[in-house]
Amino acid sequence: MEQQYIIKGGKPLAGEVTISGAKNAALGILAAAIMSDETVTIENLPNVRDINVLLQAIADIGAYVDRVDAHTVKINGKSIHSLSINYEFINKIRASYYLLGALLGKYKSAQVALPGGCDIGSRPIDQHIKGFEALGAKVVIEHGMIKAQAKELIANHIYLDVVSVGATINIMMAAALAQGKTIIENPAKEPHIVDVANFLNSMGANIKGAGTDVIRIRGVEKLHGSEYSIIPDQIEAGTFMVAAAATRGDVLIKNLIPKHMEAISAKLIEIGAQVEEFDEAIRVSASSRPGHTRIKTQPYPGFPTDMQPQMATILAMGNGTSIVTENIFENRYKYVDELVRMGASIKVEGNVAIINGVERLSGAALSAPDLRAGAALVIAALCADGFTTIDQIKYVERGYEDFEGKLQSLGADIEKVDVDDEKSIQKFRLRVS
Ligand code: UD1
């Protein structure tokens, strides 16, 4: 049954919220986990749909997967019997292509269905292929599959023409079991790159420089078992920071790494929010209307594209004109029409959004266009006058664990209901009116 959020806006968020493990780190780590024939235990796993789909894909090729609890999984790649990942999985979650690098590294052979239907713009994989080929693999695309094969993988010097998170992780995994020392220049530096490298190292890989401009990987013969805990989710944390400021609330966001949040903290401070850093927490509060600013999305440590919709949403209620420039993906403004239906004044020209802040948004019937845009619409609804419904929340559930539960615990009036469950919708309306 399809579900939707129903939200009554107008309450400042207040209290404490705990951030889950990083989805994008977990996707790389789960794929890398199959590269050992010993058992790997992974903790602080976020309990979200993308993770559950990747675990199914891993189980589907024969790996042992034991979901010990919602946030812990044991994986053993010894029993893998197939080196082919079905379209069924890649269609649901693009990052199952990480199994290409993992299987190629371990078995020198892999095939994965070509990622199709993209929701935030065309997303080529030429840099992944360039990396595999540089390591000596033959890569062909036929019958909708990418097939990569090598007699042996030999280290090489690889320069990425485009800074790509996916390509960096995929190449790192394959090179971890190649012969010799691979150098990746111009890699992505996102926190999850570092986390995947740390995880591989915990299994016996020899990777240095992840998070800097050059990654050096000395290939090892095999990887052993490990126990590893995933870093907190930078984007979930950023989403709650913006939600706290947008609702003019006061929220302590716990279990995050403040260093990862710097680009977001800086922008929130610039528009008038108070941001107080602790060792593993950040407190965000605001008491007046946000100001205006300019934002350009960039690879880390720049402002993350995955925070662009949330930030544009708070700016839509800001005082003055803000300019947002999206430099990573070409089609990431699909939520703008929804915000306009709530009364926002935003014009998109190419990759630039010109936002004339309005004093108030009003509730409307909305639909989430993708994961982060869906979260942005929730933030808008929490600030808006009256009731908002948001359909297609399956996108939000790809990456946010118990989003409505965490928001409820901060005092928000939000509930997840079946789309045609009029009774629950009526009950919610009565309760919060
Ligand atoms: C990852 C994140 C996603 C985030 C994005 C940018 C995961 C699972 N997803 O996506 O949430 O929005 O990083 O931070 O971690 N490109 C090429 N050729 C390639 C690969 C990429 O031209 O071979 C381009 C893309 O079209 C895009 C840019 O490089 O314009 C960045 O993409 P990339 O960093 O690869 O994003 P993903 O790994 O897909």
Image (spheres, helix red, strand yellow):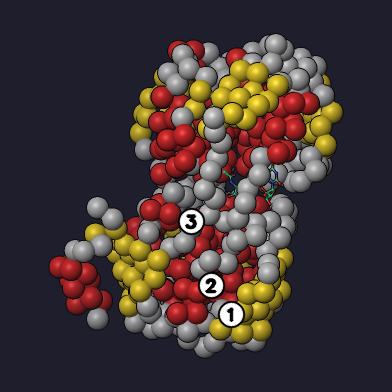
Q: Amino acid at mark 1?
A: Ile
Most extreme residue toward the left, as rendered?
423
Q: Residue at x 82, y 24 (%)?
A: 156
Q: Amino acid at mark 3?
A: Leu
Q: Is mark 1 within 8 Å of ligand 1?
A: no
Using the numbered discs, state the Cα–Cα distance from disc 2 to disc 1 in whole angstroms: 7 Å
- Whichever of labels 3 and 1 marks the residue nearer the N terminus, that label is 1
Quarter of image, res 188 = top right
| Disc 3 residue crowd, few under 14, some 14–19, many 20+, Cα 10 Å | many
Relative side of 71 to 357, left or right: left
Relative side of 7 to 206, left or right: left
Using the numbered discs, state the Cα–Cα distance from disc 3 to disc 1 in whole angstroms: 20 Å
Residue for badge 2: 336
- Whichever of labels 3 and 2 marks the residue nearer the N terminus, that label is 2
* Contact? badges 2 and 1 (CB < 8 Å): yes
Residue for badge 1: 346
| Location of residue 7 in the rendering, given as x and y in whole percent from the top left corner | 34, 71
